[in-house]
Image (tube, helix red, strand yellow):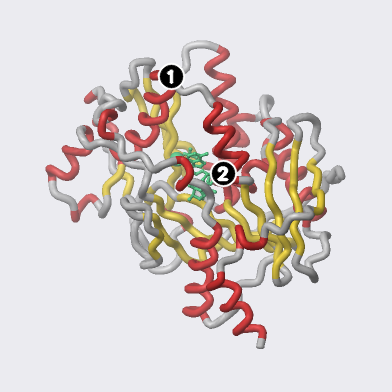
Amino acid sequence: MKSKAKVSSIKQPKELTTYRRDGTGLWLYDGTGESYFYFPDSYVDRNFDLTAGIANFHKIPEEQNVGDFPSLLAAMIKHEQESGAKCDADIITFRGIMTKLLTVPIVKEPFSLKVITYDGTIMIKTDDSAELSRRAQQPSNDFQKKCEYAGYKFETLVTLPKPWSQCTRSQIENRSKQPASNYEQFISVVRTGIGKNKMILAGEVDAIFDYKEEGQNLSHYIELKTNRMIYNENHQRNFEQKLYKTWAQCFLIGIKKVAVGFRDDNMYLKNIEVYETDEIPLLLKDKINCMSSLKFFGGLIEWLNQMDKTENRSYTLTYDGTGESVVLVPSQESFEDEFVSKEFREWRESNDK
Ligand code: 0WD
Ligand code: CA
């Protein structure tokens, strides 16, 4: 089925709750775990090596690093218990899934997603086994390993576990030597919507750029990215694609800033540029039309939300990498157990009584 482009207005996203993964891979719901961006401009002159500590990269096994629905639903149970109200939404998913849908008109990468309707809500996740085999097939030479590490190392280098004033000098100075880890994740659960369609999206947040407030922190978050320095038009085009995807990723959950660490081919940090999410469509103007992607996305979500939610069913949602047709097909096999934990089922059943 093809979605018809329609103008759609996006609601102002609102943070419902946060949760996190700790350094051992455990999911915790204690309202902490955010990092703070701290990197004075003058530090770029220190020529930091983004491969420092690579031999001791604390890397989570790929099979443990997939979108974990039960932990998202556990965060929702906690939020519903604390607020005393059910979070209704038409769609619950990870922000990364919505980034894929929003960027279809430009990115043109195939995907295969699993979808269920459950208790009146549409839930969407990646097909983990397909995703893991895709990752396993990707070439991984030394250079690519360094690029991957440099991304996490950049996060370690520019963030602190507490506001700057509460950190010791050595905590700040030793960041350049510490090995990076991709175990820790801080996830914000956000309520948003496009047109009349209500969504709850869970997205990883890299850091707070200024200070934390009680309750709403969306306007304080910053997304961190690394990119090679730009020397030619090809580099420029690749960077524009990355900026476009980053715009989609941040826009969806209301993250207002993006810091890009530019590195040379030897993985030394050369410069940091901070962008406002809202200015990115203007920067890309004449090259990539962010607003037409948004119209496409509005139409797609409107169409998806027309599916019958009164019965619990399973589907696949696929895109073949060409055109703009996203296809929804009923599945014989039920995916419900991949999404819905026993805990969430019992919580919903106890509420429906
Ligand atoms: O398809 C997805 N959205 C996936 C989500 C694929 C694999 C994992 N996850 C997990 C994330 O680890 C997190 O626990 O789901 C949760 C929420 O993720 P999200 O915010 O929806 O994910 P996304 O917006 O796609 O990416 C955010 C970050 C990435 O940072 P960058 O700066 O590259 O955007 O999540 C990590 C990564 O740090 N991440 C991945 N790490 C390794 N392999 C992957 C991946 N395929 N996808 C996301
Ligand atoms: Ca990031």
SS at mark 1 in the image: loop
Question: How much space separates mark 1 and mark 2, taking CA atoms?
Answer: 27 Å
Q: Amino acid at mark 1?
A: Asn
- Residue 9 visible in rendering: yes
Marker disc for residue 208: none
Quadrant where the N terminus is found in the figure: top right
Camera-nearest residue between 267 and 13: 267
The residue that mark 2 highlights is 249
- Residues at marks 1 and 2 touching, judged by CB atoms closer than 8 Å: no
Instruction: Point out residue 349 in the picture as x, y percentages from the top left corner.
Output: 63, 81
Q: Quadrant of residue 44?
A: top left
> Where residue 341 sits: x, y (%)?
56, 67
Residue 199 can be seen in this image:
no
| Residue 242 as seen in the image, left or right of residue 173 | right
Task: Give the quadrant of the C terminus.
Answer: bottom right
Q: Is residue 311 left or right of residue 52?
A: right
**Residue 211 percent location from the top left of the image:** 34, 56
Question: Disc 1 designates what residue?
Answer: 141
Q: Amino acid at mark 2?
A: Gln
Q: Is residue 168 above or below residue 86?
A: above
Of tags 1 and 2, the one toward the viewer is: 1
**Pointer 1 or 2: first along the chain:** 1
Q: Is residue 170 left or right of residue 183?
A: left
In this view, 279 is above or below 238: below
Query: Vertical placement of 36 versus 234: above or below?
Result: below
Cβ of disc 2 within 8 Å of ligand 1?
Answer: yes
| Residue depicted at x 71% and y 59% | 334
Which residue is rendered at x = 56% and y = 71% of the image? 342
Q: Nearer the viewer, residue 302 or 184?
A: 184
